[in-house]
Every structure is written in C-alpha cells, then in structure tokens.
Image: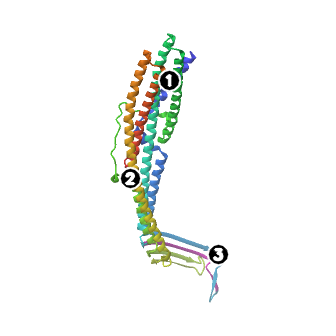
Amino acid sequence: MKKIIFITILLNVIYVRLQAQELFSLEKCKEMALENNAKVKNAQLSVEAAEQAKKEAFTKYFPGVSATGAGLVAEKPMFSMQSEQGAVGMLKNEIIGAVMATQPIFAGGQIVNGNKLAQAGVEVSRLQKQMTDNEARLATERYFWQLISLKEKIKTIAEAETMLTRVQNDVTAAVEAGVTNRNDLLRVELEQHRLASVRLKAENGLQMLKAAFGQHIGVAPEAFDIEQPDFGDMVLPVAEQGGVATLQQRPEYQLMEKSVDVAKLQVQMEIGKNLPSVAVGAGYNYMNFDRGRPTEMKDNFGMAFVTVSVPLSGWWGGSHAVKKKKIELRAVENTRQENADLLLLQMQNLWNELNEAYNQILLAQKSIAVAEENVRMSEKHYNAGIAILSDLLDAQNLLQQSRDQYVEAATGYCVKLAEYRKAIGENP
C-alpha cells in the first residue's frame, strides 16, 4: 500500500513539473537568447559606451570654460616698500580669481575628424553587436537541433525496444514449445541490455545539453522544453547561392570597410597635429591685495585674446608620423582585400556543404526504406523458421542506424543552412 502511495505521489510530481514547462519554438529560443545572453548584453553596453564617446567628442565644438582662484595668508608681509611714512609691508592677505572662455577656431581638422572617428566608433560597435547577435542565433540553432537529434535518437531506441520485446515474446514462446533453445533468448536479452545502455547515455547527454541550452537562453532547464517537429512531414527549407553582391551585406565585410575609413581618419588626425591652431577667448579677472590693510588694492577687469599655435619643432618628427599612418592605412586595405577573398571562399564552401547535407538526407531516406523492408522480410523468414535470430537482430540494428542517420542528416542540414544564411549576411 505504501509503495502504491509513493508511486502515485511521484507521478503527480512529474506531472506538475511537466505542466509547468513552457514549450519554446526555435524562433522563441532565439528571442530569449537575444534578451538574456551575457555576450549580447555586453555588446549592447559597448554600443551605449560608443554613443557616449560620440557625445563627448561633440562637446569639443563648444568653448572651453575654466575658472581659477587663489588665496594667500602669510605670517608677515612678503616684501615691504619704503614710503614717506616709513617701510610699508605688502602682500600678506591676497585673493585672486579669474574666469576664462576659449573657443577653438581652427585646430587642423582634429575636432572635425575626432567627431568622425567617434561616429565611426558607434558604427563599429553596432556592427559588432550585429555579429554577436548572429552568433547567438547560430548557437541557438545548433543547440536546438542537437536537442532534436537526441530526442529523436531516444525515440528510435524506444521503437527498437518495442520491436525487441515483440521478438522476445516470440522467442520465449518458441523456447517453451521446444522449437528453439535458450541461446536465442539470451541473445535477445543481451540486445535489450545494449539498447538500455545506449538509451541511458542518450538521456544523460540530453540532460546536459538542455542545461547548457538553458544557460544560453537564460532559462532554467527544468522550466522549458522545445517544440519537436514531425520529421515524417518535415519540409526542409532551401537557400539560394550568394556571391560578391551578398558579401557586402555581411557585417564582417562592413566592419572591414569601416576599419579602412578609420585608418584614413587617423591619417588626417596625424596631419592635423602638425598644422597651426587658432583660438579666441575672453576672460574676467578679480584681484584683492592686502585685504584689511592700509595698502589694500582691489580691481576687476575683462579681456579678450587670440592665440595662434604653430608646432615648428614638431614638423620634422610629425612628417614621419604621418608617413607611418599612411603605411598602416595600406596594410589595412591589404587585409580588407585578403579577408574579403576568404569570406567569398567560405561562402562557396558552405554552399557546397549545404548541398552535400541535402543529398545525405535523400540517401538516408532511401536507406530507411531498404532497412524497413529488410526487417519485414527477416521477421517473416524467422517466424517461418527459414532464418536465424541473428539475421533478424542485425536487420533491426540496421534499421535503427538508418533512422539515426536520417535524423542526424536532417538536423545537420538545418544547422548548415543557418551557417550559410549567416555567411551571406542574412539572420540565421
């Protein structure tokens, strides 16, 4: 009685936990990854930081305002002057204050180019965020289809166990009737133990993979499950081959283009360091000397000024710095071209692999049809007594392997399709 009560409670707990699980589609899993993945969050923070740097650079267009003040309290006057009344001490209690505003008029283009660099920094961070998003989507595809593959493998094992149970019943009846010996029954039991071992490994692998997937999308593994497609009616998506035109859609290529733009701006910034700079300014000053003394003096006045700075001694070294930046620019351009060629090669390679994966599906489907017919004939011949048990067990193993190969081919194709879509600049 206690055992029955315990089993009932256990089944109720399992039922409640299953009811609490939320079923996620592939697209829902991608949304969760983009919302909760730590790398995606950090990429967004990088975008926000770059936007703040852009706002900081924009403030360089406005006047720079500074205020200074100083006070002095001395034990005795710092010096004295001789007058008709005798020696008079001066500079004992002093206050000086000034406010200055300086507006740059020309700075060799450094302010303008500095703002362009800050804008480029924002665009680079956004491209990097897009790449991180794509990586998160692709990782989600891989996790999702790996889970599907393991689930289908466990289902295939269950079907094989069901078939083996039917064979066991037939063999047991044959043994009891004296038609065959117990060796056949032992062979069936060994095969059952093998399948049980395979199932255990698959279930453990499924548990660990689901935990990793949950960490990726930010959901506890026991709180969700994934929607499982019907492989029997599954319509596999297809893709069109991309070329040079699609290369420009890739954020990786756009990032390389942006690196060239940044290198050009750095050349202009280096040139600007060697050009004269002009600024105008205005200020207000307040002075109060010898406060509270007979020699007290105080005054305030405003002023305007123009400054011109010419880096005469820096031209020699600056010319070499500019040449260095131009050399670095050529290196960046060379790297862009090389990486563009590699990206095109990657696209072609993934296209070939995608077509190969599709053909593997077609072959796996044919193998299943052949394996199913082989099992049917082997079981028929065994029951008729014209085939041995090992032939039937071998036929069942081949069917299980064929079904596993089909699932692996189908899920592998879906992952390869996501990789190819990412390679041609589409969201995987």
Vertical side of 281 occupied by 205: above or below: above
Give the image location of residue 330, x and y in percent.
Answer: 43, 65
Which label's residue is closer to the chain start, 1 or 3?
1
**Image quarter in which the N terminus is found:** top right
Residue 74 badge: 3
Residue appearing at x 51%, y 73% in the figure: 98
Looking at the image, can residue 111 be seen?
Answer: yes
Identified by mark 3, the residue type is: Ala
Identified by mark 1, the residue type is: Asn
Dot 1: what SS?
Answer: helix
**Image quarter in which the C terminus is found:** top left
Which label's residue is closer to the chain start, 3 or 2?
3
Q: Which residues are magenta?
A: 87-104
Observer-nearest of 106 and 275: 275
Give the image location of residue 339, x and y in percent.
Answer: 42, 56
Residue at the spot of label 2: 344
Give the image location of residue 406, x and y in percent.
Answer: 41, 33
Observer-nearest of 352 and 73: 352
Residue 12 badge: 1
Identified by mark 2, the residue type is: Leu
Cα separation, mark 1 vs mark 2, equals 56 Å
